[in-house]
Amino acid sequence: MFMIERYPRLMRLMHWSAAALILPAVLIGLALAYKLVVPDSPAADWWTDVHVLLGLSALGIMLLRIIIALRSAKPPIAGTRTEVLAARGAHFALYLLVIVLPLSGYAGWIAYGEAPKPFGIPLPNFEPLATFLESKKAGEWLWPVHEYAGLALTALLVIHVAAVVRRSWLARNSDRVDGLNRMRAGPAKPL
């Protein structure tokens, strides 16, 4: 069987595109949640609009990324059985959270009777869903889901980066392909 050492170019592009959207969305979300921006101010509205657009864009990229991942060859994950299971579980959780976060945020808006309008751009209200969510008072639990999922994603991103740094450090004097080189843009690092 043919084995590859790096992810295909399109998978790497999707990875870094998702990272470029997710990281600022998470940081802005944390700043808004912990009131580092004055609540109910023009600045908070502006940052909320940016947060919504980044989150919905990340959702689109992630759904496309899943389709591409299902059809692409992937390099094997090196490590012990525990490390491989942990990596697979963490990746599954990352994908799940990046889907749950924008959906719970969007649903939270419409549960209160209005779809988000980032920078005045009206987004669909999905009327039957909005009516159902309003009748069930879903906003009361959707916003906490959004907030806790954001905290979980923040923790997983820190763990993900730490794992890549660890794998790269361990691979520096061995034949193992390091975690960063598997997803690095540009040509492969010579072995």
Image (cartoon, helix red, strand yellow):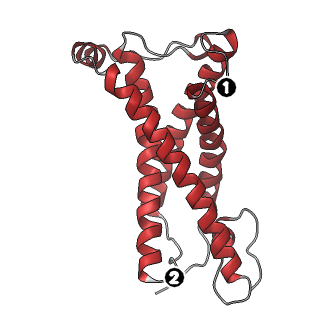
Describe residue 98's horizontal placement relative to residue 107 as left or right: right
Secondary structure beneath disc 2?
A: loop
Residue 6 position, x and y percent, is 62, 73
Does residue 66 show up? no
- How far apart marks 2 and 1 lie (CA) works out to 40 Å
Q: Which residue is mark 2?
A: 79
Residue 67 position, x and y percent, is 44, 53
Count of picture labels? 2
Residue 106 position, x and y percent, is 43, 25
Describe residue 94's horizontal placement relative to residue 15 as left or right: left
Frontmost of labels 2 and 1 is 1
Secondary structure beneath disc 1?
A: loop
Residue at image coords 40%, 72%:
85
Q: Is residue 160 above or below residue 187?
A: above
Earlier in the chain: of badge 2 and badge 1, it is 1
Q: Amino acid at mark 1?
A: Leu
Does residue 113 show up? yes
Describe residue 8's horizontal placement relative to residue 125 as left or right: right
Q: Which residue is mark 1?
A: 36
Q: Amino acid at mark 2?
A: Gly
Q: Is residue 145 above or below residue 9?
A: above
Q: Is residue 54 above or below residue 176?
A: above
Q: Nearer the viewer, residue 6 or 1?
A: 6
Residue 54 position, x and y percent, is 59, 32
Q: Residues within 10 Å of mark 1 (few under 14, many from 20)?
A: few
From the image, which quarter does the C terminus lie in?
bottom right
Q: Residue 8's quadrant in the figure?
A: bottom right
